[in-house]
Amino acid sequence: MASSKGAVIGYIILTGLVVLSQGASGVADLAGVDAIKEGLTALGYPAYLMTILGVAKIAGVIVLAVPGVTRLKEWAYAGFAIDFLGATASHLLAGQAVGEAAPAFVFFLILMGSYFLRPPSRILAPPLSL
């Protein structure tokens, strides 16, 4: 919502971090990387979840990266927030150390920074009221 030069630079950096990390993560999910499969299994999730998450992450990355499609951007931000918070909770509820959960929560905070620093052109206009 901010429009200063610093806010725009912050938005670009934070969004870039989300796009790069989740793009790489989505590709790794779709490639079936063994370390990710082992991590999901350790958390009690089935291996096929990698395919679902991989497709969703790649779709979300595309939506965040391209201009326009502001309504889809809202969904992408929501999806990534659910993914990051769900990963954080999964690690903690599975009895893993806070250090295992921290990266997902840090990326949630990065995502929120990107969301709140969006330029006006990337914000969904409120619906018209009658």
Image (cartoon, rainbow, N blue to C red):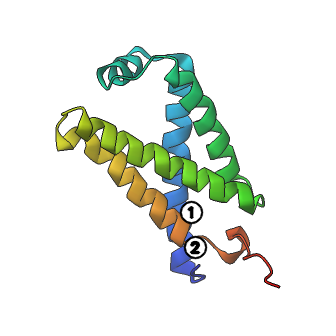
The spot of residue 38 in percent (x, y) is 34, 17
Which residue in the protein does label 2 denote? 8
| Residue under the point 50% across and 16% down | 32
Crowdedness near tag 1: few (<14), some (14–19) or many (≥20) residues, C-alpha within 10 Å: some
How far is mark 1 from mark 2, CA to CA? 6 Å
Which residue in the protein does label 1 denote? 12
Q: Amino acid at mark 1?
A: Ile
The spot of residue 128 in percent (x, y) is 80, 80
User: Dot 1: what SS?
Assistant: helix
Residue 26 versus residue 86 in the image, above or below: above
| Residue under the point 62% across and 45% down | 61
* Res 54 quadrant in image: top right
Q: Which mark is residue 90?
A: none
Left or right, residue 45 beside residue 22: left
The spot of residue 100 in percent (x, y) is 24, 38
Residue 49 versus residue 63 in the image, above or below: above
